[in-house]
């Protein structure tokens, strides 16, 4: 009886795992994949976590992910209007939006689905456990939408 319970439990867990993997939105980034052009990541010459983030994105979406090592990352941040208090270590440009920091692709998919009239989205700092960052995730990742005038508000939590 104990063996049957173990087998049934394993089968149920395997089925649940397959359902999660195949559910829409979990692994399908159709709106990111539909963008015109490339995904550009501007990063410091010495930042290793930015390279890991780039690999994270490149393995999961179809548009080409191009890295640009820059001497002064503040230049691109200023050009796109990233508020200083929301800055992170790299800036990604997707279509007309900036994506600041180690933002999960689920948030970028939401951005590409809704296409709001904003400058971009940002997750300040380098949160532990976020894509490209080592360690455990502690609490929600809070992602902000940034308006064209530099004001911002919460966009979503993951």
Image: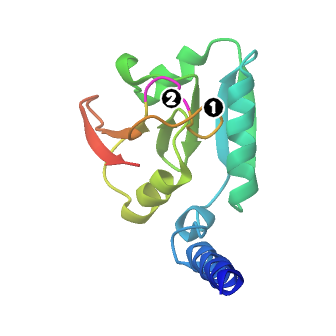
| Residue marked by disc 2 | 127
Magenta span: chief secondary structure: loop
Q: Residue furthest top?
A: 72
What label does residue 133 carry, if any?
1
Residue 127 lies in the magenta-colored region:
yes
Q: Nearer the viewer, residue 129 or 126?
A: 129
* Percent x, y of residue 57: 67, 49
* Residue 120 at least partly seen: no
What residue do we see at 25% from left, 31% from top? Answer: 149
Q: Is residue 123 left or right of residue 67?
A: left
| Element under disc 2 | loop
CA gap between label 1 and label 2 equals 7 Å
| Element under disc 1 | loop
Relative to residue 75, is residue 53 depicted above or below?
below
Q: In this view, does 35 lie to the left or right of 69?
A: left
Residue range in magenta is 124-128
* Percent x, y of residue 10: 67, 77
Q: In which quarter of the image is residue 140?
A: top left
Relative to residue 154, is residue 43 depicted above or below?
above
């Amino acid at each position: 009886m104990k063996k049957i319970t173990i087998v049934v439990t394993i089968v149920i867990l395997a089925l649940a795992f397959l359902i999660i993997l195949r559910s829409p939105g979990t692994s399908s980034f159709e709106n990111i994949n539909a963008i015109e052009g490339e995904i550009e990541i501007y990063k410091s010459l010495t930042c290793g976590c930015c390279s890991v983030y780039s690999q994270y994105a490149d393995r999961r979406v179809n548009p080409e992910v191009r890295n640009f090592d820059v001497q002064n990352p503040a230049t691109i941040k200023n050009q796109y209007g990233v508020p200083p208090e929301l800055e992170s270590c790299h800036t990604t440009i997707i279509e007309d939006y900036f994506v600041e920091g180690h933002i999960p692709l689920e948030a970028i998919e939401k951005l590409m689905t809704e296409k709001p009239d904003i400058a971009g989205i940002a997750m300040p700092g380098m949160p532990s456990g976020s894509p490209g960052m080592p360690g455990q995730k502690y609490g929600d990742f809070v992602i902000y939408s940034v308006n064209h005038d530099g004001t911002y508000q919460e966009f979503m939590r993951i």
